[in-house]
Amino acid sequence: MPDREQRLYLVCYDIADPRRLRRVHRCMLDWASPVQYSVFIGKFDRREREAMTAELEELINPARDDVRIYSLPSKTRVLGYGRSWFPDGIQLVWKGNDLLDLRDDGETDDDVRSA
């Protein structure tokens, strides 16, 4: 992936210690949008993803905690049931049942391109 090409990522974690859990959660709020309590979605280029990963590595205990970062394919099908966890102003952009992008309300359709 070129340095500046952005992709969607799903970041999930299971943190054993409540204090570390709060720190990881606060860190992730700076980088991505929460989907569920320990699941976030964000759009990063390679450098941003590496910076986020470095921050997370500083916060976790690798012997007890688990952090997973999944690159989402450009044609991702997402099925959701129940209420959305996205904060006000954050939305997913869809074409049919395929997830195209994550954006805030300030962006227009012209600003959004396939991930």
Image: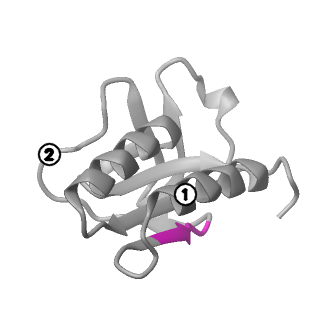
Q: Residue at x 68, y 29 (%)?
A: 111
Q: Residue furthest top?
A: 106
Describe residue 23's horizontal placement relative to residue 85 as left or right.
Answer: right
Mark 1 Cα shell of 10 Å, populated few (<14), some (14-19), many (≥20): few
Q: Which residues are magenta?
A: 68-73
Q: Nearer the viewer, residue 82 or 23?
A: 23
Name the colouring of the figure. one colour
- The C terminus lies in which quarter of the figure? bottom right
Q: Disc 2 designates what residue?
A: 83
Q: Residue at x 48, y 43 (%)?
A: 32
Q: Secondary structure at mark 1?
A: helix
Query: Does residue 105 belong to the magenta stretch?
Result: no
- Does 57 appear above or below 37? below
Disc number for residue 112: none
Describe residue 44's horizontal placement relative to residue 90 as left or right.
Answer: right
Q: Nearer the viewer, residue 2 or 77?
A: 2
Q: Residue furthest right?
A: 2
**Label 2 or label 1, whichever comes before in sequence order:** 1
Describe residue 72's horizontal placement relative to residue 4 as left or right.
Answer: left
Identity of the amino acid at label 2?
Answer: Arg
**How far across and down, in percent of the image, does residue 1 sit?**
82, 64
Identity of the amino acid at label 1?
Answer: Glu
Q: Nearer the viewer, residue 12 or 6?
A: 12
Describe residue 74's horizontal placement relative to residue 99 as left or right.
Answer: right
| Residue 36, visible in the rendered structure | no
Mark 2 vs mark 1, foreground winner is 1
Q: Secondary structure at mark 2?
A: loop
**How far across and down, in percent of the image, does residue 80 sit?**
24, 59
Q: Disc 1 designates what residue?
A: 58
Q: Residue at x 31, y 25 (%)?
A: 88
